[in-house]
Amino acid sequence: MRHLMSPLDFSVEELDRLLDLANDIEKYPEKYAHACDGKKLATLFYEPSTRTRLSFEAAMMNLGGNIFGFSSAASSSAAKGESVSDTIRMVSCYADICAMRHPKEGAPMVASAVSSIPVINAGDGGHQHPTQTLTDLLTIRSLKGRLDHLVIGLCGDLKFGRTVHSLVRALARYEHVTFVFISPEELKVPEYIKEDVLDAENIPYKEVERIEDVMPELDILYMTRVQRERFFNEEDYIRLKDFYILNNKKMKLAKEDMIVMHPLPRVNEISVEVDKDPRAAYFRQVQYGVYVRMALILTLLEVNVC
């Protein structure tokens, strides 16, 4: 039995097979429509989520399975003081697989240590968001045709953005990938990411404050929102939340085949005028998230579809 706590839990070869499966699901959805008949997915979401929770539910329903769970800690026995370990032990009696989101880093790992069913980390605090990373990898490979030889700009909240941290770790394993970190001083990518991942593997990167200075060189621009829920000081959030806004004027500086990604939800960091640009890929990214979660569920449940 396997769990997914980090995108690094899969080797590059295993990731390629997972993405191949997701592409096959995209092409032949009817082939997988009953792959999980009789199987149950538990969605244990201790903090709010729209895309991730609904994407997991849509994925399991598309496979013919059933879903149940809760969408906030207040609507679970956590409000009564039940531990994560006890909750997953209980849920293991009901479900075949579980997706857990929790505001505390490491909570899904704690659950996986005592669970008798596969546990998927659906986001733990500011730490990891592996299924978003799988979504991002599938989006990039599907739209760019590769995961190597890319210049990737990551813009916005690079300090608290778990999607950014996970994506950097995952893409660092591919050849000739260069990172461009675009953020204000207060929201720079953490030192441990630079030291443990990039410097350790001699992966080129640079840090800038102005998005206009690097737009022409990017193959991918990955935008993120400034996350109010990660700030302790409301004044700091208000000061930084509008630091970057992508608009058509800035898009004119970019390559014709650059793609714009965003893990969503968007607040105002991407102007709605950009939505009409064919390079805007963030809503296609959402659809790819369903395919890759379908592939992940099949892989962890060891369901083979001929």
Image (spheres, grey):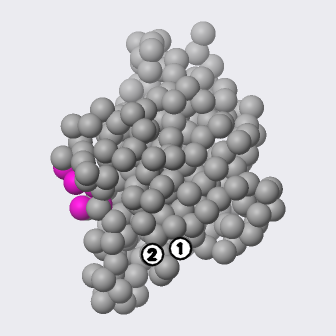
Q: Is residue 246 magenta?
A: no
Quadrant containing the C terminus is top right
Residue position for label 2: 184
Q: Position of residue 165 (x, y in %)?
A: 58, 61
Task: Please name whichever residue, 190 or 90, is drawn nearer the observer in this view of the structure.
Answer: 190
Q: Residue at x 33, y 72 (%)?
A: 243
* Range covered by the magenta-colored residues: 268-272
For disc 2, the neighbor class at 10 Å (few under 14, some 14 to 19, many from 20) is: many
Which of the 4 image quadrants contains residue 285? top left
Residue closest to the eye, 56 or 272: 272
Res 294 label = none
| Percent of width and height locating residue 298 | 57, 29
Q: Which residue is at 39% across, 34% downward?
A: 256
Q: Is residue 68 left or right of residue 273?
A: right
* Helix, strand or loop status at disc 1: loop
Horizontal side of 179 relative to 140 (left or right) equals right
Viewer can see residue 254: yes
The amino acid on which the numbered mark 1 sits, given as a three-letter code, is: Lys
Type of secondary structure dominating the magenta stretch:
loop
Q: Which residue is mark 1?
A: 188
- Residue 41 seen from this side: no
Q: List x then y, in percent, for residue 240.
A: 34, 78
Camera-side residue: 78 or 24?
24
Is 122 left or right of 290, judged from the image as shown?
right
Image x and y of residue 65, in percent: 43, 30
Q: Residue furthest left?
A: 273
Cα distance between the residues tagged 1 and 2: 6 Å
